[in-house]
Image (cartoon, rainbow, N blue to C red):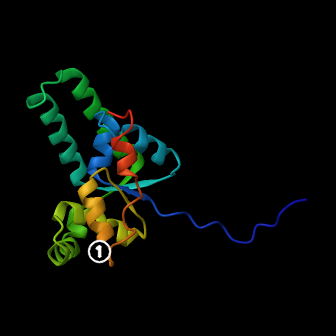
């Protein structure tokens, strides 16, 4: 039996990836496997333009501070920036910096994090983050509760993930 098509299905909002989630994915942080599991179930993503700079900073720290080999880090940075370019709607911080400032001053959250939260609010979505402090803080604020993708940090800290 054929089914009549009545209306196209509404596309789900993109999952907002903050810099910590993207860094975990490409720089082999302890949440890498969990991030892979989560994003495999998603069809589209969004992030802020500042993710590129934060990836660069993570790559620099890996080499300059943690003394990792340059070439693997350079390749991880290339892959990470390509992932963003190829898979994410990249939003300019200029579009929401005012709203992020208001949220940050009201709730005591850094503007960098508020940019991602405001983007999720704008897109009616959630932020995927591996920043446990941000995750916990957002879930303690009634107005913001539920804006971050649920992650079980206790289970992840005790797992075999790096």
Which quarter shows the N terminus?
A: bottom right
Residue shown at 25%/23% (left/top)? 72
Q: Quadrant of residue 7?
A: bottom right
The quarter of the image holding the C terminus is top left
Task: Tell me where residue 110 sits by quadrant.
Answer: bottom left
Q: Residue 45 falls in which quadrant of the image?
A: bottom left
| Nearest to the observer: residue 43 or residue 25 | 25
Above or below for 71 versus 15: above
Q: Residue at x 50, y 44 (%)?
A: 40
> The residue tagged with tag 1: helix, strand or loop?
loop
Q: How many marks?
A: 1
Q: Give 68 or 2, whichever is nearer the viewer.
A: 68
What residue is drawn where x is 22% and y is 42%? 55
Q: Position of residue 52 (x, y in %)?
A: 23, 46
Q: Which residue is mark 1?
A: 141
Q: Position of residue 74 (x, y in %)?
A: 22, 28
């Amino acid at each position: 039996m054929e089914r009549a098509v009545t209306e196209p299905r509404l596309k789900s909002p993109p999952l907002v990836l903050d810099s910590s989630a993207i860094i975990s994915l490409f720089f082999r942080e302890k949440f890498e496997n969990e991030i892979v599991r989560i994003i495999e179930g998603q069809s589209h993503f969004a992030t802020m333009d500042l993710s590129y700079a934060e990836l660069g900073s993570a790559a620099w720290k890996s080499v300059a501070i943690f003394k990792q080999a340059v070439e693997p880090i350079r390749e991880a940075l290339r892959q990470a920036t390509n992932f963003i370019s190829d898979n994410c709607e990249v939003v300019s911080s200029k579009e929401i910096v005012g709203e992020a400032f208001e949220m940050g001053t009201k709730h005591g959250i850094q503007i960098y994090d508020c940019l991602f939260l405001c983007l999720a609010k704008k897109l009616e979505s959630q932020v995927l983050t591996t920043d446990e402090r941000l995750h916990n803080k957002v879930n303690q604020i009634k107005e913001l509760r539920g804006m971050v993708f649920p992650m079980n940090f206790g289970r992840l800290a005790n797992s075999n993930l790096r």
